[in-house]
Image (cartoon, rainbow, N blue to C red):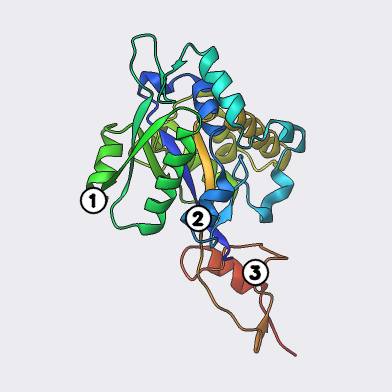
Amino acid sequence: MAPGRNPVLLFFNLDDERFKDENFRKAIALGIDNEQLVQIGMSNLATVSNPVLIKGGFSELINDNLKHMWYDKDVEQAKEMLNDLGYSIGRDGIFTDSNGNKLSFELIVPAGWTDWIAVSQVLSSQLKQIGIDVVVSQVDFGLYLERIRNKDFELALSWVNYGINPYFFYERWLHSRNAYSGDNRGGWISLTTDSLLEIFRKTSDEKERQLAISSLQLIVLQEIPAIPLFYNPTWFEYTTYNFEGWPNKENPYALPTITGMDKAYIMMNLEPVK
């Protein structure tokens, strides 16, 4: 298994009225088995993410008091939630609204991205188990990004650039300035979220930052702006013949990649072999 890089999420178009209900988004989240997505879709090379998308190297930032809110696949609970929202299951096993419209959505994924296409097909199969029909559409990459920018989609499999730490990641994912045209693919817009993110820019007080990122975790778990799935794998090689101190499974202090600012941090941690 390769180290996790940028997280992959299932994004809702939050401009679509059907996805404005957090309980509806939560029901969809309960229909997904991330382990199966990684095993089948990613050939077990990716890393399953936790629901708050804080990587192992920053585990001290995870609010353990919120772990009871972490969720896993629960088909019966998902169906119960959809039923409570007023949807009725049909003879074909698919829920319909009060007007008889089926819960059927298009999921867009970049054409040619064979691993993500496989993941999307597994997602479709999983969500059918809770009574939601998902049709996978492979879209040319340029058109894929254009459709997201124009809010011309229902569901999208996409990614967020993580950066050097979770603070930068949360800003890219959830700040309203990044809605649709940036990494905030689903268009999450919240004054509360923006205010919490601004704390990172205005203070170096770690206690204030810790409180802010704990509050962001609560928002992510309660309101499900998107559904975290897994981290894309990072491909790299290193040797301890001349230098030691490389990031590894036991000490994942940085992303082992030759791009981005992580490489400078890695260089600072290397020591010559004596």
Q: In the rendered image, is residue 219 in sight?
A: no
Q: Are marks 1 and 3 in contact (CB under 8 Å)?
A: no
Cα separation, mark 2 vs mark 3, equals 27 Å
What residue did someone put label 1 on? 140
Q: Choose top left, top right, bottom left or bottom right for residue 268.
A: bottom right
Q: Classify 196 as above or below 114.
A: above
Q: From the image, which quarter does the C terminus lie in?
A: bottom right
Provide the secondary structure element on which disc 3 rests.
Answer: loop
Q: Is residue 177 left or right of residue 162?
A: left
- Where does the image place residue 61, in percent across and percent down from the top left? 70, 44
Q: Classify 251 as above or below 12.
A: below
- Give the mark toward the camera: 1 or 3: 1
Residue drawn at (37%, 18%) of the image = 17
- Where does the image place residue 196, in percent across and percent down from the top left? 58, 31
Residue drawn at (49%, 22%) of the image = 24
* Number of numbered markers: 3
Rate crowding at label 1 as few (under 14), some (14 to 19) or many (20 or more) other CA atoms within 10 Å: some
Identify the mark nearer the N-term, 1 or 2. 2
Provide the secondary structure element on which disc 2 rests.
Answer: helix
Q: The residue under label 1 is which amino acid type? A: Asp
Residue drawn at (47%, 43%) of the image = 9
Identify the mark nearer the N-term, 1 or 3. 1
Q: Is residue 209 left or right of residue 126?
A: right
Q: The residue under label 3 is which amino acid type? A: Pro
Cα separation, mark 1 vs mark 3, equals 36 Å
What residue did someone put label 2 on? 40
Provide the secondary structure element on which disc 1 rests.
Answer: loop
- Give the mark toward the camera: 1 or 2: 2
What residue did someone put label 3 on? 247
